[in-house]
Image (tube, rainbow, N blue to C red):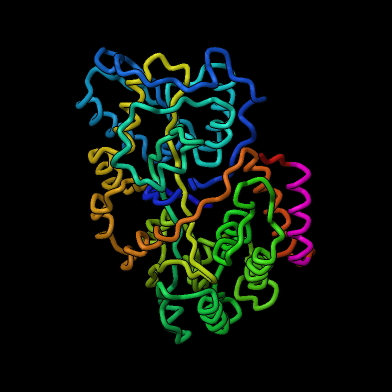
Amino acid sequence: MRKTGLLMIVSIMLVASMLICACGSATKDVSDGKVPSGQTETSNETKTDDVAKDVTITYCNFNSSGGNEETLNKMYEAFHEEYPNITVKIETIGYDDYFTQMQTRVAGGTAPDCYELNIENFAAYANKGLLAEITGADTSAINQTALNAFNVNGKQYGLPESFSNVVLIYNKDLFDKAGVSYPTSDWTQADLQNAAEKIRALDENTFGIWQPITYNEFFKVVAQYGGALLNEDKTEFTINSPENITAAKALVGRVTESNVQPNTLQQGGMGDWDMFMSGRLGMIPTGIWAFQTFTDNCDFAWDIAVEPGSTKKATHFFSNCVVMNPATKNPGAVATWLSWLTSSTKSADIRLAAGWDLPALADMNALSSYLEITPPDNRKAVFESLDYLVMPPVIEDYALMSDIISKYLAAAADGTMSVEDALNAAQADCEAQIKLK
């Protein structure tokens, strides 16, 4: 997944994070399962006595790097005006280095008082007892779906700070040339395929759609076709179910059969965003964080719609969260800072004004200013898609599962394996290498 400055609603969250952009790949296990010295597997009961005295806490993040460091600092300044006794020392690390550094610091017992995690890494940290339960934060203003994404066995180990989701972005000019009506919220996968074929017929260098054939797209399309990668209680893999095979054939067939999506040779080294911005791609399901980049670089009219489904609709949800170190000496101050950062009106206003992530607020009216920004004209589709949010099956070996499935999907897309053989192999490898509950 791609990310340019906004993950806008990462927390619009309304769904979760999942994540990203933070979208990005998850790291390996954070430790050997042993709790670092000074930390306990039982969560801290958040105390409040430290809130009344002058304290200094440390906070580390990755999401502000590359353009929003000043935005985060403005948030802290607004927070400090309300809570002058709480000083927050902020450290920002680039995404590429962040999780490696955090893994080392957590294992060594030198982690900050609180820090940011993406949804993929959250499960590994929580399952290994490396996070404190956050019991003193006011979560009433936070979107419940987003909040639940970071709740483990009834305990809140993280608070969603932002969210983003995926919509169908389309080139209106190409639709006009092909004589195809624009996508609506009622569209199905059949409607999408029909439009993609008509746009592909315009000329040999124009394609109808590009939806990456990777794990991140697959788990969502699987849901659209009524499937799932795990059984309901997450004790068994169901990667090669009939529903999942149908979903994979729909994705792969766009490349190998109808060719409405470019194969590797036809891509010519271009990425999906680059091809869309060049005016050669009719549709692209991608994150709302693409809006500003497309606004700056597309010389054609474009808009968005809720992604089509098959037996039902399903839309990505990505979210990052903030968590507490069990070893912190100031849990009350930490909870106060994390609660303010994730749910206060002032924090949300600063985010929106900067065009950064969308806060995961329960009150959508607080995000009304977001709807006024164009393009896209149909920005309300961002919120409509929240009715169909799905999250990946977050397991401890999330990264390994993702890598295995992506590898075999790539083989199917390249034509070196049939879809059935690819999913059967992915099922076998996941069963052999990953232990579920």
Asked if residue 421 lies in the magenta stretch, the reply is yes
**Residue 325 image offset from top left, x and y in percent:** 46, 22
**Residue 87 image offset from top left, x and y in percent:** 30, 19
Q: Which residues are magenta?
A: 418-433
Furthest-left residue in view? 81
- The quadrant in which the C terminus is found is top right
Report the front residue among 187 and 279.
187
Residue placed at 38% from the left, 39% from the top? Answer: 161
Q: Main secondary structure of the magenta part?
A: helix
**Residue 155 image offset from top left, x and y in percent:** 46, 33
Quarter of image, res 328: top left
Residue 266 visible: no
Residue placed at 23% from the left, 53% from the top? Answer: 365
Quarter of image, res 335: top left
- Side of 76 relative to 399 (left or right): left
Query: Is 26 placed above or below 137 here?
Result: below
Residue placed at 54% from the left, 84% from the top? Answer: 198
- Side of 363 relative to 401 (left or right): left
Quarter of image, res 35: top right
Furthest-bottom residue in view? 179
Query: Is 276 placed above or below 345 here?
Result: below
Report the front residue among 341 and 175.
341
- Side of 44 relative to 49 (left or right): right
Residue 92 visible: yes
Residue placed at 63% from the left, 26% from the top? Answer: 31
